[in-house]
Image: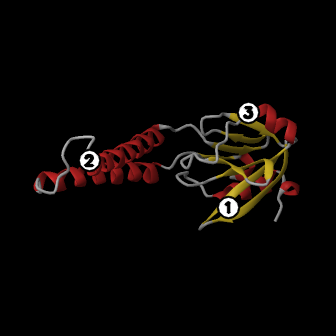
Amino acid sequence: MASRGVEARYGRLHNLGMAVVSAVMIGAAILHFANNPANAPSLSLNDPRFVLFAMLAAAMGYYVFVGVSRTLNRQPQVVIDRDGIGLGFGRDRRFTWDDIEWVRLRRLALRPQLEVGIASQVFMAANLRLSMWNFDDGLRPIRGLPSAVLVRDNGLDISASAMLDAVKAFRPNLVKS
């Protein structure tokens, strides 16, 4: 499997499940207030409960959109093959093995995450548009490592440890512990 490469796509079950749960939460709130009109907030921006529930509904609506769009997106988000590592997540950048200085697996919270150290000049030229505040992004910057990215496997159909195994199959000398 690794000799011909590994492709990680958005997992259908995870992302569709996120969309369904978010839609059910919006529906449950609407149904609750429809059945208990005395407890329902007034439809006015002066009512803080209305503002709160409207913001929560907008947030859940965002996750419905994200879940559905990722479920329908069948493009590979991470490609590890004999040519290097390709990163999608809206950036679609490919790094050759010569551009990559190291790769390691690091546990962040409960899940292992794949860290990829990229040569500084290549990292700057790639313009990955990384943000510390985008919680739904599969690519994150790593604090203290200015030219490295964290590849989150949340919502992907392959785990970070399987991605590391693919890197080991092609370039075991790049793997750090």
Q: Tell me the mark number nearer the camera, choosing from 2 and 3.
A: 2
Mark 3 Cα-neighbour bin, 10 Å: few <14, some 14–19, many ≥20: few
C-beta proximity under 8 Å, tags 2 and 3: no
Q: In which quadrant of the rendered image does the C terminus lie?
A: bottom right
Earlier-in-chain disc, 2 versus 3? 2
| Front-most of residues 152 and 41 | 41
Residue 15: x and y in percent read: 45, 49
Residue 52: x and y in percent read: 32, 50
Q: Tell me the mark number nearer the camera, choosing from 1 and 2.
A: 2
Residue 5: x and y in percent read: 71, 46
Q: Which residue is mark 1?
A: 161
Residue 87: x and y in percent read: 68, 40
Q: Which mark is residue 127?
A: 3
Residue 10 in the figure: left or right of residue 80: left
Q: Quadrant of residue 154?
A: bottom right
Secondary structure under the numbered disc 1 in the rendered image: helix
Q: What amino acid is at disc 1?
A: Ser
Task: Give the residue displayed 35% in from the left and 49% down from the top.
Answer: 56
Q: Which mark is residue 50?
A: 2
Q: What amino acid is at disc 3?
A: Asn
Earlier-in-chain disc, 3 versus 1? 3
Q: Quadrant of residue 119?
A: top right
Earlier-in-chain disc, 1 versus 2? 2
